Image (spheres, rainbow, N blue to C red):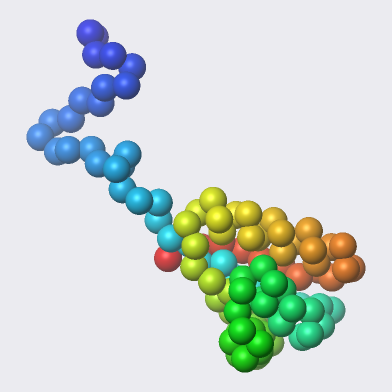
Amino acid sequence: SDATPNTRRSTGTRVLDEVRPPRACRVLLHNDHYTTMEFVVRILMTVFHHSAAGAERIMLAVHREGIGVAGVFPPQIAETKVALVHRTAREHGYPLRCSIEPE
């Protein structure tokens, strides 16, 4: 084929993957039996920049429902925040788990 490596061939449909903005991701906090509510509130305020009242509300959702949305971000930012939560939690001796799911 004489197509250059960066050329995509298509049969009538246009490929627009390269121009779409990155899909947003929800960052989720998961409940556990060891991480304190106060620590979760502090994480929500420092890493996710929620107000004290907003952080308290999300923390209670995590506590009651087992999971809560900490925020919605582009994929790279979401991954960075998850890594920061995990590192900070481990530094303080907590097993707090954080994950990402597509919005």
Viewed as shown, does residue 33 lie left or right of 73? right
Snapshot quadrant of residue 30: bottom right
Q: Residue at x 31, y 48 (%)?
A: 20
Q: Is residue 61 visible?
A: no
Q: Is residue 7 visible?
A: yes
The location of residue 97, given as percent across then percent down, is: 71, 67
The location of residue 77, given as percent across then percent down, is: 55, 56
The location of residue 44, given as percent across then percent down, is: 66, 76
In the rendered view, would you say 63 is above or below 29? Answer: below
Q: Residue at x 50, y 54 (%)?
A: 75
Snapshot quadrant of residue 47: bottom right
- The quadrant the C terminus occupies is bottom left
In the rendered view, would you say 37 is above or below 45? Answer: below
Q: Residue at x 84, y 63 (%)?
A: 90
Residue nearest the observer in this picture, 55 or 97? 55
- The quadrant the N terminus occupies is top left
The location of residue 66, given as percent across then percent down, is: 65, 82
Count of numbered tags: 0
In the rendered view, would you say 49 is above or below 5? Answer: below
Viewed as shown, does residue 7 lie left or right of 71? left
Q: Residue furthest left?
A: 12
Viewed as shown, does residue 21 lie left or right of 27? left
Residue nearest the observer in this picture, 42 or 93? 42
